[in-house]
Amino acid sequence: MTASAQAAALESELRALGTPQRAASEQAYLKSDLEFTGTAVPATRSVVRSWCRARPDLTRRDLVAVTRALWARPVFECRMAAVELLDARAALLRADDATLIEQMLRTAGTWALVDGLAEHVMGGLTERCPELAATLDRCARDDDFWLRRSAMLALLRPLRRGEGDFERFSRYADQMLDEKEFFIRKAIGWVLRDTAKRRPGMVAAWLAPRARRASGVTLREAVKPLPADVRERLLAARRGALPAAHRCRS
């Protein structure tokens, strides 16, 4: 069966599990021009897992072909299935596949596809292939804000574990800290928040000299895991209640 035929079969399964009501609701929520089948994300993942179980000898070539065929369909759930498929068979991917992932990120058009693709697929591949850090550096300077957001989210998984390249994230965040785009502001805060759960002192120290520059969205998200007194000092600093040179310690 060709990759296109397999994608068509997967789409049929997804449609059978969807509802018109959910399709309309999801399309309105995401403000997307894609068609929606109204299939819940857990059901989409189940379809992908079943497809993978039936193909224990799946090759990288077939994985990429079916992923491309799914992504080519202007149907949200087909594209979600493509993301889930890459995540489910991430071990088959090579550094060269970053080109495909970047193409998908550029055409995703919604956080609901970008975030899993960036954090799980690109992030996982970058952990296994450190040479892709140069690709993230380039994406962090891209004109497309989804690529800039993705560069930060690709660093998230190891940072969440208390590991990872915080220095690289710091460079990205510093160059984007003054941006007005909501999805950039939210991503900076998100990465800082999850990093702070393991390393609150490091995040507080990073935020202290930047509290006035950071947007409210960024700062409110970032300080959530911090001790209450540190959180209040940082929020007060942004409001101008404390000198800009004030430093927080935790």
Image: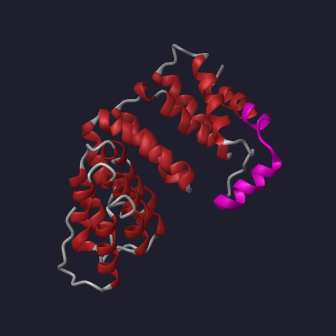
Is 130 located above or below residue 33 in the figure? Answer: above
Q: Visible in this render: residue 216?
A: yes
Residue furthest out toward the right: 20
Q: Is residue 22 magenta?
A: yes
Across and down, in percent, residue 71 comes to 59, 41
Residue 248: quadrant of the picture:
bottom left
Q: On the picture, is 198 further left or further right than 180?
A: left
Q: Residue at x 41, y 58 (%)?
A: 190
Q: Residue at x 46, y 23 (%)?
A: 60
Segment colored magenta:
13-32
Residue 123: quadrant of the picture:
top left
Quick one: 129 or 200, which is closer to the camera?
200
Specify the quadrant that holds the C terminus: bottom left
Across and down, in percent, residue 124 comes to 37, 37
Is 214 located above or below residue 167 in the figure? Answer: below
Q: On the picture, is 197 further left or further right than 88?
A: left
Quick one: 45 or 56, which is closer to the camera?
45
Please tell me whether the stretch drawn in magenta is mainly helix, strand or loop: helix
Q: Residue at x 58, y 18 (%)?
A: 53
Q: Is residue 79 magenta?
A: no
